[in-house]
């Protein structure tokens, strides 16, 4: 095993070991005594060390990896169908691993302060910190396994472990009544997609005779099999990456702790679907039908998330819906044939979305509410948080020269080329759909990002607050450090060496080509839409600082706030019929199956009771019965003898 493949194998192993050791720690007592403090300190050390070790390994892998590498060994051979243990590494995988580990480390450090006992609390506000830190480590290990896996079954293991960890982490704060329901919803909705993902992997593995990704990509699959497999894989992508129609779990997942929201939204669970498609993109590239479905799914999701974010009052739900929309940009880039543009936006999104969620956590930590209608005027008392949020929202909206501007422009440019010139493997109409949806999304994103900034930090406070202030150092430093890539990572797209790392075909192109960043007249339209969206929100707020700019939406506001009531549609078409079927099944089981068993038991008891009562008869009656029986037997014998 070479040095690079050893580094790849250790990447998920380090946080996995930290997580397993952390699970052995006892929960801290509620009185936060000496034992509780010791368990918490050990949990913090394990969590931070596991994430820091993974980040160091990811950086070392990025530096050492000069060409794709792979190593595997057969794990199971099922009659010629092999499952292997191994890694498949390239520069794109190394970059994504760095992003995952960096966000995980920021979340582990930030959580130390976010879930700390307050100075006026009599008991520890979170005595379950040890399992919380361990579950973050396992979550990180699962995503890193998805990143480096060289076998589809191994990738599936990481995929499913992420689902389990997301359930546990969303439901972490059991004092919130909505947390268990949100965790269960996330688990069940993503499981629906995962059924398709599992079937797609099975089809590919059976077709290729192996689950090794290299074998699956090299095999000449039948057209029908490949189309069916890619469509089934997209079901899993829709679930994990919260794409239409399996997107409804993500906003409700905001019931989890804010650091967990940052972890799920920035670089782990929702990014897994996008990364899985890039991993298997040669299969999708020769399946136009699957790319067309992906393009429609991306466009609908992009606009759905953007419009839903315009009418939310909950700070975290605005960011959640923005994640849904931004993932739509990534899947749209894949649909029009540009995995590098999708991966570039995945990396910049990981930076600025983690920054935004951790900054939002600082605000919530300071003011004690998630509702923007109760905030305002925080710029003066929380200047560090304010400026970090400005950078994050600017990158989200695509303000130059922040990172999101360059990566989003890359997506729009490749979509424009696909629409106008027919480039890419998908039909031209897919390019038009993604391009137009992306342009509308630019204006709407700028509008709701400006609204969030104005409602949260500017104007006057809309409720009395008890001395809000910037977070302590352990929470402030992760936010400050994440602000650097959120601001500057987009400029890396000008570097040819960085661009080559995101190419699935590293030999394509020349150093003079700008494969990730485009500078030209095509930037004017997105910039004009950006200015229009931000300007409209600012003008409405300027006219009346106390009013919510969302009031300009009129009768559309409740529709947008309810995300076009797709949750209600899902509840009516899926949840209620499923519950009705479950009730009918339970009734049939209780009445028919249990009734037959219990009825036969009651009949046997009744017969036994009757016979018992006969046996308990008085002696004269018993003697008369015996004589009568003897007479009947004798009479029967006589009759039988006569007839014979």
Image (cartoon, rainbow, N blue to C red):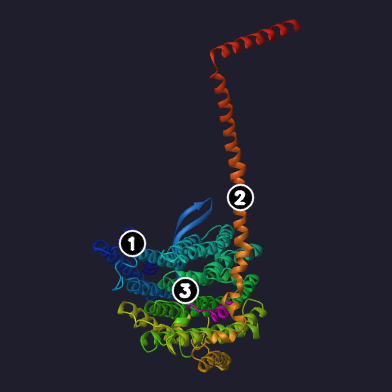
**Residue 368, percent across and down?**
39, 76
Residue 265: mark in rendering: 3
Quadrant of image for the N terminus: bottom left
Q: Is residue 554 left or right of residue 470?
A: right
**What SS does tag 3 mark?**
helix
Instruction: Give x and y (percent) for residue 445.
Output: 54, 84
Q: Nearer the viewer, residue 451 or 156?
A: 451
Q: Residue at 31% of width from left, 79% of height from top?
A: 472
**At x 64% / y 73%, what residue is drawn?**
292
Considering depth in this image, is 166 or 335 the residue closer to the camera? 166
Q: Is residue 517 visible?
A: yes
Residue 511 shown in magenta: no
How far across and down, in percent of the image, does residue 16 sit? Answer: 37, 63
Which residue in the protein does label 1 denote? 22
Q: Is residue 308 magenta?
A: yes
Farthest residue in the right direction? Answer: 643
The mark that comes first in sequence, 3 or 2, is 3
Vertical side of 348 occupied by 45: above or below: above
Q: Nearer the viewer, mark 1 or mark 2?
A: 2
* Residue ID at (35%, 62%): 17
First-in-chain label (1 vs 2): 1
Q: Is residue 484 left or right of residue 221?
A: left
Residue 590 or 616: which is nearer the viewer? 616
Does residue 9 appear in the picture of this structure? no
Q: Which mark is residue 320?
A: none
Identify the secondary structure beneath mark 2: helix
Give the SS element for disc 1.
helix
């Amino acid at each position: 095993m070479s040095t690079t493949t050893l580094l790849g194998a250790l990447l998920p192993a380090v946080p996995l070991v930290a997580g397993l050791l952390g699970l052995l720690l006892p929960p801290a007592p509620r009185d936060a005594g000496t034992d509780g403090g010791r368990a918490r300190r050990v949990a913090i050390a394990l969590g931070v060390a596991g994430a820091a070790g993974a980040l160091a390994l990811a950086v070392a892998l990025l530096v050492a990896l000069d060409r794709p590498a792979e190593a595997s060994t057969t794990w199971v051979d099922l009659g010629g169908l092999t499952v292997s243990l191994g890694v498949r590494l390239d520069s794109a995988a190394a970059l994504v691993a760095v992003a995952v580990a960096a966000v995980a480390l920021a979340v582990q450090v930030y959580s130390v302060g976010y879930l700390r006992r307050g100075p006026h609390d009599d008991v520890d506000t979170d005595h379950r910190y040890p399992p919380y830190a361990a579950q973050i480590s396992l979550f990180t290990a699962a995503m890193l396994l998805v990143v480096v896996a060289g076998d589809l079954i191994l990738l599936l293991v990481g995929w499913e472990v992420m689902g389990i960890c997301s359930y546990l982490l969303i439901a972490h704060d059991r004092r919130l009544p909505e947390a268990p329901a949100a965790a269960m919803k996330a688990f069940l909705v993503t499981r629906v997609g995962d059924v398709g993902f599992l079937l797609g992997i099975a089809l590919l593995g059976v077709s290729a005779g192996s689950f090794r990704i290299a074998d699956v990509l090299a095999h000449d699959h039948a057209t029908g099999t490949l189309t069916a497999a890619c469509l089934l894989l997209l079901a899993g992508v829709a679930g994990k990456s919260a794409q239409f129609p399996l997107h409804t779990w993500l906003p409700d997942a905001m019931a989890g702790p804010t650091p967990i929201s940052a972890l799920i939204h920035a670089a782990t669970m929702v990014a897994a679907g996008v990364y899985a498609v890039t991993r298997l993109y040669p299969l999708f590239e020769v399946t136009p039908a699957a790319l067309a479905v992906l393009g429609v799914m991306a466009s609908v999701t992009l606009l759905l998330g953007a419009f839903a974010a315009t009418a939310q009052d909950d700070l975290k739900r605005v960011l959640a819906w923005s994640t849904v929309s931004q993932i739509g940009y990534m899947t749209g880039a894949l649909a029009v044939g540009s995995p590098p543009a999708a991966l570039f936006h995945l990396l910049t999104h990981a930076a600025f979305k983690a920054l935004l969620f951790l900054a939002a956590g600082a605000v919530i930590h300071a003011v004690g509410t998630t509702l923007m209608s109760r905030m305002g005027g925080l710029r003066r008392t929380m200047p560090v948080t304010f400026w970090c949020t400005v950078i994050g929202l600017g990158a989200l909206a695509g303000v130059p020269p922040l990172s999101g501007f360059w990566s989003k422009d890359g997506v729009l440019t490749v979509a424009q080329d696909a629409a106008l010139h027919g480039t890419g493997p998908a039909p031209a109409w897919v390019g038009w759909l993604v391009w137009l949806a992306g342009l509308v999304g630019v204006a709407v994103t700028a509008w709701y990002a400006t609204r969030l900034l104005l409602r949260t930090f500017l104007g006057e406070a809309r409720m009395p607050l008890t001395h809000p202030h910037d977070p302590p150092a352990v929470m402030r430093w992760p936010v400050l450090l994440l602000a650097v890539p959120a601001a500057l990572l987009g400029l890396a797209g000008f570097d040819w060496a960085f661009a080559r790392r995101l190419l699935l075909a590293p030999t394509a192109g020349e150093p003079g080509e700008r494969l990730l960043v485009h500078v030209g007249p095509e930037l004017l339209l997105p910039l004009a839409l950006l200015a229009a969206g931000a300007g409209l929100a600012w003008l409405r707020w300027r006219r009346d600082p106390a009013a919510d700019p969302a009031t300009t939406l009129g009768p559309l506001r409740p529709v947008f706030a309810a995300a076009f009531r797709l949750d209600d549609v899902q509840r009516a078409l899926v949840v209620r019929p499923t519950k009705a079927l479950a009730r009918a099944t339970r009734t049939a089981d209780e009445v028919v199956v249990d009734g037959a068993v219990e009825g036969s038991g009651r009949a046997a008891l009744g017969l036994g009771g009757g016979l018992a009562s006969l046996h308990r008869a008085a002696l004269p009656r018993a003697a008369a019965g015996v004589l009568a029986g003897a007479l009947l037997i004798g009479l029967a014998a006589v009759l039988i003898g006569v007839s014979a």
